[in-house]
């Protein structure tokens, strides 16, 4: 488990390592202790708080956050925690944890307190795909991006015993991320957080940049009742509640 870093720098990009890692650690703890349903809910609460508290007209990239502005708080905690969560998924758990361990070992007790750029330099050494890592880091740490997914023209038709489902997915926001769309029936988790045997889904995926859209299709051995974008809460986005349609 990754905890709050004991020696993060106080320069620009330094607070992110302490405050963002605190929320990132909580995401991992909730997932381990209470399961993916509770983790999904926790991530969505962080996302909603960030969307409510941010100031889009003046928000700065993560590498430029220093805590001097009132809206820096939600960026340091909520957004940064989410971005570290996305980085874990982008790299894969094992490479990401190896990178985190190396970072802590390198800088623990080191008078040269690290900042976000130092963290990215260490993590890159463990990335299975350095080009993909660079693209992710450029967008989420050095630039300002935020996807906003919308669903259009949902259709379903029965052919024999199979339901054909189609939908047009649009990224009305910014940034380019792989994202999944699930046609589903039933509630995925019980109130206890345990998976429900009555839940069924079929997925399709896309990678959309700013203003792009793509027609997606999938087949289901069940009649789907709704379609949802990013069912595992892996992509930070605006207006998540609008990335959902019922048939």
Image (tube, rainbow, N blue to C red):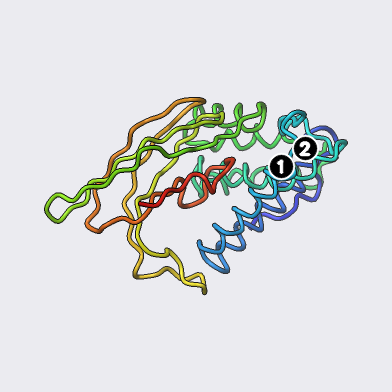
**Disc 2 crowd, CA 10 A, few/some/many (<14, 14-19, 20+):** many
The answer to whether 198 is drawn above or below residue 160 in the figure is below
Give the x, y percent position of residue 136. 56, 31
**Disc 1 crowd, CA 10 A, few/some/many (<14, 14-19, 20+):** few
Disc 1, SS = helix
Quadrant of the image containing the N terminus: bottom right
Furthest-bottom residue in this view: 192
Front-lying residue, 6 or 216: 216
**89 relative position to 22: left or right:** left
Residue at left 45%, top 67%? 189
State the mark number for residue 162. Answer: none
Residue at left 54%, top 46%? 240
Disc 2, SS = loop
**215 relative position to 77: left or right:** left
Give the x, y percent position of residue 187. 42, 65
Give the x, y percent position of residue 171. 49, 32
Residue 117 in view (yes/no): no
The answer to whether 47 is drawn above or below residue 168 in the figure is below
| Disc 2/disc 1 C-alpha distance (Å) | 10 Å
Q: Nearer the viewer, mark 2 or mark 1?
A: 2
Give the x, y percent position of residue 42. 61, 58
Residue at left 28%, top 40%? 217
Residue 147 in view (yes/no): yes
Q: Which residue is mark 2?
A: 114
Mark 2 and mark 1 lie on one chain; the one further toward the N terminus is 1
Residue at left 29%, top 43%? 155
Q: Which residue is mark 1?
A: 106
Furthest-right residue in this view: 68
Front-lying residue, 223 or 38: 223
Q: Are marks 2 and 1 in contact (CB under 8 Å)?
A: yes
The answer to whether 126 is drawn above or below residue 224 in the figure is above
């Amino acid at each position: 488990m990754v905890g709050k870093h004991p020696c993060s720098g106080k320069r620009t990009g330094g607070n992110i390592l302490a405050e963002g890692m605190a929320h990132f650690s909580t995401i991992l703890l909730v997932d381990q202790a209470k399961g993916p349903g509770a983790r999904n809910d926790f991530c969505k609460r962080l996302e909603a708080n960030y969307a409510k508290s941010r100031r889009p007209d003046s928000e700065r990239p993560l590498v430029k956050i220093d805590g001097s502005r009132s809206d820096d708080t939600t960026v340091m905690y909520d957004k940064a925690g989410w971005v570290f969560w996305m980085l874990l998924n982008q790299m894969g758990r094992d490479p990401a944890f190896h990178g985190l361990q190396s970072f802590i070992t390198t800088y623990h007790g080191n008078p040269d307190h690290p900042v976000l750029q130092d963290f990215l330099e260490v993590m890159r050494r463990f990335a299975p795909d350095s080009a993909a890592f660079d693209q992710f880091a450029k967008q989420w740490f050095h630039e300002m991006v935020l996807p906003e997914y919308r669903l259009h023209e949902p259709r379903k038709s029965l052919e024999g015993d199979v339901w054909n489902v189609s939908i047009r997915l649009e990224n009305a926001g910014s940034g380019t991320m792989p994202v999944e769309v699930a046609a589903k029936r039933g509630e995925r988790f019980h109130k206890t957080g345990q998976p429900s045997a009555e839940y069924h889904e079929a997925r399709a995926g896309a990678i959309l940049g700013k203003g792009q859209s793509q027609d997606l299709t999938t087949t289901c051995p069940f009649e789907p009742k709704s379609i949802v974008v990013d069912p595992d809460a892996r992509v930070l986005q605006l207006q998540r509640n609008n990335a959902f349609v019922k048939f």
